[in-house]
Amino acid sequence: MAKTPDDGHLELLQGTLDMLVLRILQWGPQHGHGIGQAIRMQSDDLLKVETGSLYPALHRLVKRGWLKGEWGVSQANQRAKFYRLTPEGKKQLVREETRWRQLVNAIGRVMKPAAAPGSEE
Amino acid sequence: MEILSWLKRRRPGELDEEDFKDEIRAHLAIAAEEKMADGADNKAAHYAALKEFGNVTLTTEAARSIWTPRWLEALRDLVSDVRYAIRALARNWAFSLTVIGVLTLGIGLNATVFTMLKGLALTPLAGVDGSARLRVLFGQTSTGRVVRVSYPDYQYIRDHDRAFSGLMGSGLFVVNLGRGRSARQLSGELVTGNYFQVLGVRAARGRTLLPSDEIAPGRHPVLVISDALWRRDFSADPNIVGKTVEINNYPMTIVGVADSTFHGTIVSYDVEVFIPVTMAEQIGLGAPATNVLSDRRIGLLFPQGHARPGTSLASAAAQVDAIWSALSLDRPLNAPAQRLRVTPFWQAPSGGQTYVVPTLAVLSGMGLLVLAIACANIAGLVLVRGVSRRGEIAVRLALGATRKRIVRLLIVENLVLAVPGAILGVVLARRGIPVFIEYAEWLATPQRLFFNISVDSLVIGFTALVGCGSALIFGFVPALQSSRVDLVSVINQDASPRGASRGRLRGGLVVGQVAISLLLLVGAGLVSRSLDAARRANPGFDPNQVTSLEVDVNLNAYDEARGRVFYRKLLDAARAGAGVEAATLAAYAPLGFLDTRVQRVAIQAYEPRRGEDLSFLSNTIGSGYFRTLGINLIAGRPIEDRDDESGAPAMVVNNTLAQRFWGGAANALGKRVRVLDGEWRTVIGVAADVKYSRINEAPRPYFYLPFLQSYRPNMILHTRGQAPVDRLVDQARASVTALDGDLPILYARPMSEQIGGAFIFLNLMATMLLLFGTAGMALAALGTYGLVSYTVKQSTHEIGIRMALGASGLSVVREFLGRGLWLGAVGSVLGIVTALGVTRLMGSVLFGVSATDATTFARALVLVLGGVMLATLVPAWRAARTNPLSALRHQ
């Protein structure tokens, strides 16, 4: 089941979804749909997360103890399960960010002689 | 099912399903709300939210898999696959039960046969380490007759041999233990002093026999008994060592009890006493006035031993050959043994292996063929089921199931068939082996048999594994094919025949099944015709209305004078019995399965060629023998009471012997023959040939000696009469008891029952082959039916079009019949060619029928083609009756 980028969406790099979720939750608890929307909006509609990947990712992070899920009520007065970062999750986010920056840096160096990063077909 | 409930209970640390459902519901609600806020109506908003969310089941499954340990997940999948498979197969119960049944038979038979083969080949002797590596030496005459080695020759070989790390000798004898009421006849081995050392068998009590027991002839009255005898006859007496018992009425001292696992070195015999060879004369072996220990013409032992490390069988044989040549030069003797051969133990010509191995070989061949058919059937089943479920498989793939998962499901279905088959097969083998052994033991009574064949879990497990494994492998290829479904074409409902490769596989399966079932049927046919021929064959005597009762007056310590009186009175009493027409005495009964006494003869005015074997089977008989057994006398007169000690030495020969030496029965009368070193006897009569040992033996020379001129303490009383044979048996018993209530009767039974042993292997083989032939045939027909009817189903569309275009039902039927018969014909040709090559190997078990018997082949062919035709005709006929419109609409 290969996912093909369509209507201008980019495919998420392997292993980056967990980091994005942690990052979104830095601003406070959010429910699954909200996290998906936030990733989409903050990436200017370039990144679109499938629920089929999002929910397993959320559960994976809960299982590792980086998130905690609790039922609550949204501003629109809707019942939903809200996820928030645990202290462990915050530390993990820092680790992932550092690693990400190193990765981008390294890849950037390799790609420098060619075109600008992030525009390969 | 405990596992299931355990799995259900195992919840902690897993995905909370209800909670997750709630979470998704909330997600959808929020998303729908947003859409409505953007102006969509309620219904459209919910629909759009659902569509955006994607596959709920897959997402749930993915979330679930985060929480569930992988092995648990796999186990759950497996359980659900198994349940699904069981449901699916239960719907097809007739087919499923057949496959399970055949696997059961196949695995059960194979396990039984391999257990026995393993017992014989790998551990022929219980309680002897490395008995498979034991080598046996035996002499062979120019005619191929096997002879034992004389004691002096054994000593010479032992002293000159360098190939073996030790060479012992042993020979089987029947010995009497004790006297009077409690006396019994046992199998005993006459052994050399190093017997136990060479075998590495220890004494559980006391000591074993030692080389020091073999020094002076007649001076070592000691013996070792088996553990079973110790427990049975001596109530496990802890002070057994040092006790004196009578062996053939000679007092001997028990010096030890052998290890409980040890049963002697004669396969299928339970040997219970071990006596030093140096005591042979004292226990009455060998004719009077001969010296069994120094006469090189008297075969006494089979030398046996382990080859030295690094000595191959061939080099051991070469060395023994060299010793034998040196011995022949050194001390020339016109001995019957032309050469000395060396062979692995399981091929030795002396024990039970001689008759068991060929039978087992044929049976194991059958077993493998049946297993092959079962496998082909399973392959066909998977193929047909897989393809007829293309729709289902396509839907599963569309829902996101992986191909791996589909293949696994199909394989699990095979397993659901294979596992019960394997379990039942193992049960069958576990039950069957003891039953088989008991049956053999019953037939052999009064002789005690011992087979070193235990129900071997290793062999049974291995066979079951092979059975299951082959079922799996055969099911795997078609499963793989079935999973390769082209989604688009299936969803477009294009179900027209596709893929030449699948057609070829299908055709191959039909051809294979037809060929194998033909092979099985030919085998079954040949053996059943053999059995028929054997039953109809004239054994040369009439066993009906005849009784056999054996006694040995030595068991009550009669001397010759008392014995003669006893037998005279016994005959008188038997003949006076109500309804008795004739009675006689004989040393051996015909059709006894094993060869009995062989005696060397000299024939007056006949100069034997160098190395010519002049030793023939013989019997010792009383007056009235030929009349009692219904054997025709061709010339002269039978043995009568006047042929006693005071009469001229007389003998009767059989027709084959008369033809061989004098060119005819009439010429034989008056000719003179000497038995061993006895006096010259005159031939007084010529009797018709009889099947002396086996029903399928070739005619062979035979002679009869008068009981009154060559007394033996051990005789069989035969009576014939018109009274019910069971009453005759009781009468015979009563007449012995009336004469001496303390004399044990070794056995008493109708002769027809006694000679059953001659038929047992033919019978067993025929039953097995028929069973398997029929099962294989049924299975092949079923398999063919399944495959053909599947083809027809696939072609419904095509048939519809054809019939709509005006084709007649008959032409449709004809076409399918043609296709089926073509495959059947190819399979038959293959089967016949194979059968022609293979049945030749069955020569040893066939009787009165050629291995290429045309009738058998024709019958098998008709059966197989008939089966194929039926399997084709039914589905084809059904197809032809299809309404073209409904066929087209169905698509």
Image (cartoon, helix red, strand yellow):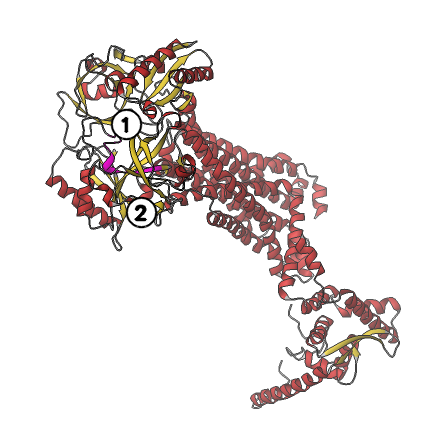
The range drawn in magenta is B272-285
Q: Chain of mark 2?
A: B
Left or right: B241 as drawn, with respect to B457: left
Give how far across and how far down residue B700 sits, in percent: 27, 25
Q: Is residue B240 visible?
A: yes
Q: Chain of mark 1?
A: B
Disc nearer the start of the sequence (2/1): 2
Q: Nearer the viewer, mark 2 or mark 1?
A: 2
- In the image, residue A108 above or below residue B126: below
Which residue, given by chain and number where applicable, does mark 1 sit on?
Answer: B597
Query: Real-space Cα distance between discs 2 and 1?
Result: 28 Å
Which percent across, then down, holds residue B545?
42, 15
- Residue B263 in the image: state x and y as whole percent: 37, 41
Kind of residue sitting beneath label 2: Leu
Q: Give the camera-side residue of B167 and B329.
A: B167
- Is B196 placed above or below B761 here? below
**What amino acid is labelled 1 in the image?**
Arg
